[in-house]
Amino acid sequence: FVVIYLSNKFNFNMLHKSIFTVFFLVTFFIGKSQTVFDFEDLTVPAPGYWNGSDLSFGFGNEFVRFENDFNPAYQSWSGFAYSTLVDNVTQGFENQYSTYAGNAHSGANFGLCYIGSNWENNFEIIPSVCFFSEDTKPLSVYVSNATYTALEVLNEGGFNQFSEGDWYKLVIEGKNQGNSTGIVEYYLIDFRNSLTFVNNSWHEFDLSSLGVVTSLEFYVESSDTGDYGINTPAYFCLDDLSFDSFTTQNLAQHAKVTVYPNPTTDYLHILNFENIDHVHILDLSGRIIMSNIQTEIVSVADLSPGIYFATIHTAEGQFTRKFIKQ
């Protein structure tokens, strides 16, 4: 709070400057509503890691959700997991949940990602995705190698050993309702130009150039590929994802454009519809599947289970709300 003391001799110029200061501070703090997802609020099961075997298909909080795909038939997973394991010396697939950095960036928990591929479409990479509940400006994330990946490329004589010219990089693409907002890259392993770099610490990866997004897509690329896609084990670790969860404009409108219940099965209710012009429902690819909705109760019973976006058009602008259809 800023308190202005007024006396018989108060200075109007000082009053003007003080009012400007109050306005600046309020605007600054509204516009800089920074959030850090540090994985510390997640409960880690007894093995020291969570890989989606409970079939919850992801984790997160009210701001962000990390998607996970667990296959009970093969007891395999892709997408995001989380862990406390920091063994950076034991080689092999059994050590797939450890970070090569030897510690989490902060606290005890960190995120883990395995990038899957489509066996039915030339083993094309399937990005791992995290979704935001609001239009969000990502700022940074800390990344490191997974132990399994790092030791495989260093294994002399091994199938996945790297040699001069090889590389392995993480790529993050921003998406806003399915449309790309930009791409950033970081080489986790780099054997080009006589280097033998294998990241063994936490690197702060700048995401600010991606602008305003509704999701982030993570994938990896490698110089070592074959008939079945990437030979390099497609893992990496992440921690402390930092982002601005609201802008000045949509913070003021947040209460006016809420949808509920979420998740839902049959109907989606749109709060304060009298302030709304119309609504579109979009799927994950950004395709409009329901358009020009002009009622506060929307039947979604015919939608397939999954994640959708409601774009809400008001006189103040357009706002996006993510919801899950069960």
Image: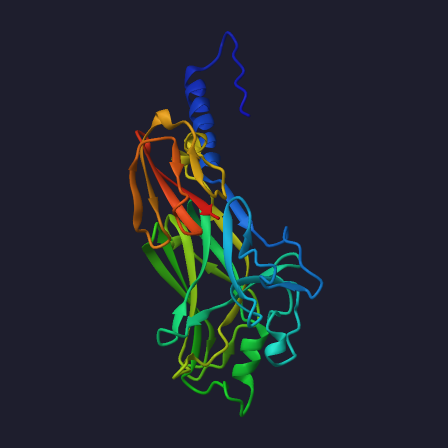
Q: Residue furthest right?
A: 46
Where is residue 274 drawn, in percent x and y?
Answer: 36, 24
Residue 189: % across, % down:
48, 76
Query: From what the image shows, is residue 230 above or below residue 253?
Result: below
Looking at the image, residue 188 lies above or below residue 243: below
Quadrant where the N terminus lies?
Answer: top right
Frontmost residue, 97 versus 87: 97
Q: Residue furthest top?
A: 8
The residue at the point 57 percent across, 62 percent down is 81
Q: Tell me which colouring the rendered structure shows.
A: rainbow
Q: Is residue 304 above or below residue 310?
A: below
Residue 202 lies left or right of residue 21; in this view the side is right
Question: Which residue is nearer to you in this view: 99 or 26?
Answer: 99
- Pick the residue in front: 180 or 27: 180
Q: Where is residue 125 in the image (x, y as percent from the top left)?
A: 40, 70
| Furthest residue toward front | 302
Image quadrant where residue 99 sits: bottom right
User: In the rendered image, which quarter is residue 148 located in?
Assistant: bottom right
User: Which residue shows up at 47% across the image and 69% down it?
Assistant: 115
| Residue 55 image position (x, y, % from top left) | 57, 59
Q: Which residue is drawn at 41% across and 81% down?
A: 228
Count the numbered circles shown: 0
Name the residue furthest left: 292
